Amino acid sequence: MSAFTALTLTVIILPLQHITLATGITAVAANLVGGLTPDIDQPTAKLWHDIPAGTIVGRIIDPFLGGHRTISHSIIGVVLFGYLSKIGLTALSHVLLVNMTFVWWAFMIGFISHIIMDLFTHEGEPLLFPINFHFGFPPLKELRIKTGGIIEKLIVFPGLILINAYLFYAYYAKFLDFLKHYIVR
């Protein structure tokens, strides 16, 4: 939900661009995948359960990424996954007739939003990996939320839904203008 919220904020803040409907749909999908991708280093992550034989692939990849909340949750990981996703999307651009620049940015917005949200969790993030220091906000670990805990389920997730509802209500005219004038048919 944080990935979608970040994408919604991006649409509100930045000037509207002309895109095809296919690009818009693909960008939203890429954003949601980007929001799950940092957890690629966890074989039990939702991302692996959503693809066929994913848990097997997750167990194979896990040792190469160093375990959960290591490289994929760091600045190096942002650069690495940004570069690899750019290569993958460039290869796909020969098959999919969408603007891969928009799709890539949507993916990265999702990826980075995941990392930002994990800064608020009890575990924190190793932003300077390979240095084994976990950053978090607030600095006192005891004041952060537990991943999958009651605060996340009852406050954070519903809060993000309410934020999205408010943003769509408050910026209804901009979203309507986008749908009417900026989606190229």
Image: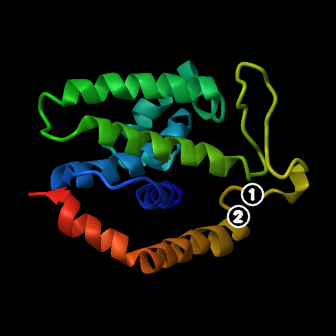
The crowding category of the residue bearing disc 1, from other C-alpha atoms within 10 Å (few below 14, some 14 to 19, many at least 20), is some
Q: Work out whether residue 35 or residue 56 is closer to the camera in this orientation and state it.
A: 35
Q: Work out whether residue 165 or residue 15 is closer to the camera in this orientation and state it.
A: 15
- Residue shown at 49%/30% (left/top)? 59
Q: Name the image quarter holding the C terminus.
A: bottom left
The crowding category of the residue bearing disc 2, from other C-alpha atoms within 10 Å (few below 14, some 14 to 19, many at least 20), is few
Is residue 75 shown left or right of residue 87? Answer: right
Q: Which mark is residue 12?
A: none
Q: Position of residue 7 (x, y in %)?
A: 44, 55
Could you tell me if residue 43 is visible in this image?
no
- Residue shown at 45%/39% (left/top)? 108
Q: Position of residue 88 (x, y in %)?
A: 30, 26
**Considering the numbered disc 2 on the image, is that residue within a helix, a strand or a loop?**
loop
Is residue 183 shown left or right of residue 63? Answer: left
Residue 71 in which image quadrant: top right
**Considering the numbered disc 1 on the image, is that residue within a helix, a strand or a loop?**
loop
Q: Which mark is residue 149?
A: 2
Residue, disc 1: 146
